[in-house]
Amino acid sequence: MLNFEYQNPVRIVFGKGTIAELDKLVPADVSVLMLYGGGSIKKNGVYNQVVAALGKRRVLEFSGIEPNPLYETCMKAVGMIKQEKIGFLLAVGGGSVLDATKFIAAAALFGGIDPWDILAKGAEVMASFQWNSRTWRHDFEIVGTEARLLWSPYDSGPVTKTVGREKEMIELPNADNVHQPLVEDFVQAIINGRPPAHSLAESAKSSLLLDAIYRSSAERQEIILSEIAV
C-alpha cells in the first residue's frame, strides 16, 4: 500500500475583531456581492463592521435568504451576479447563508442548461479562476511514508525532499518543454544500453498516485492503493 497525504488548504480567521481582516482577504479590484438573511446582521452590528472593512470596494447586497434557502431565491442572486459582473461572493450570516452562497457560486458558473441538476443529479461545475488573493498557496506537497516532497512555487523553483531531518534541494530542468529532458535521457539510455533515469516501475507508481489524487478529489472519498508489482 502506498500511504500519502493530500492537502487542500483552507484558511480560517477566527476571533474578536477579525472582521477587519476582510480588507486583506478580499481582492481590492473586484465587485463584491454581500449575501445575508433577514437583516439580523444590521441589528447586531456585524453589517457595519463588514461594510467598514470592505472600504472603497464596489459592494452590492443581496438579502432575504431564508432559514431553509429556496432555489428560486438563490437563482435571483445568480441573475444579479451575471448582470453586475460580480467577482467575489461574501456570505455574512449563519449556516443557511453559507450553504446558499455555495450553491449560488456553483450555479453562476454552471455550463449546463438547468442549475437544478447540481442539486438533483450532482452535475459537475467546471470553472477557471485567476487567483489574486494573498491567501492563495502556490505550492504542491506530497507526504509519504518515507519522505516528503514540496514544490514551491509549483510551476518553477526547486523541489525540497525531506527524509527525517535531512533536506535535499532538487533543481528541476529549466526547459520550454519540461518533458524534453526526460525524453532525451530515455533516448540516450536506449542508445547506450543503460537504464533510464526514471524506471518503468517508478513511472507506473507515479501515474497511479496522481490518478488516485484526482479521483479522490472528484469522488470526495478516500482512494486506497495496493502494492504495485511491476
Image (tube, helix red, strand yellow):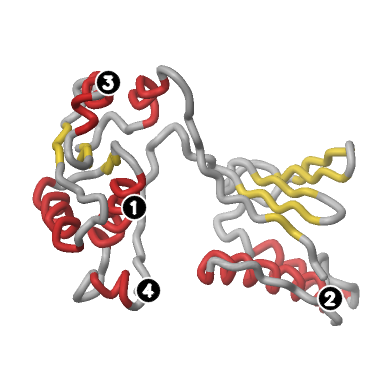
Q: How far apart are the two marked residues, 4 and 1, measured between alpha carbons?
A: 15 Å
Q: How would you rate the neighbour count of disc 2 (Cα within 10 Å): few for under 14, some for 14-19, many for 20 or more?
A: few
Q: How would you rate the neighbour count of disc 1 (Cα within 10 Å): few for under 14, some for 14-19, many for 20 or more?
A: few
Q: How far apart are the two marked residues, 3 and 4, measured between alpha carbons?
A: 36 Å
Picture residue at 82% right of the left edge, 77% below the top: 228
SS of the residue under disc 1: helix
Which residue is label 1 attached to? 99
The reply to whether discs 3 and 1 touch (Cβ–Cβ < 8 Å) is: no
Which residue is label 3 attached to? 49
Closest to the observer, 48 or 229: 48
SS of the residue under disc 3: helix
Q: How would you rate the neighbour count of disc 3 (Cα within 10 Å): few for under 14, some for 14-19, many for 20 or more?
A: some
In the rendered image, residue 70, in percent from the top left (x then y), is placed at 20, 60
Please state which amino acid type lies under the numbered disc 4: Gly
Q: How far apart are the two marked residues, 3 and 2, measured between alpha carbons?
A: 54 Å
Quadrant of res 204 = bottom right
Please state which amino acid type lies under the numbered disc 2: Glu
Q: Nearer the viewer, mark 3 or mark 2?
A: 3
SS of the residue under disc 2: loop
The reply to whether discs 2 and 4 touch (Cβ–Cβ < 8 Å) is: no
In the rendered image, residue 10, in percent from the top left (x then y), is placed at 51, 43
The reply to whether discs 3 and 2 touch (Cβ–Cβ < 8 Å) is: no
Disc on the earlier residue, 3 or 4: 3
Please state which amino acid type lies under the numbered disc 1: Asp
Which residue is label 4 attached to? 122
Q: Residue furthest left?
A: 83
Disc on the earlier residue, 4 or 1: 1
Q: How far apart are the two marked residues, 2 and 4, measured between alpha carbons?
A: 32 Å
Quadrant of res 64 = top left
Disc on the earlier residue, 2 or 1: 1
In the rendered image, residue 43, in percent from the top left (x then y), is placed at 20, 25
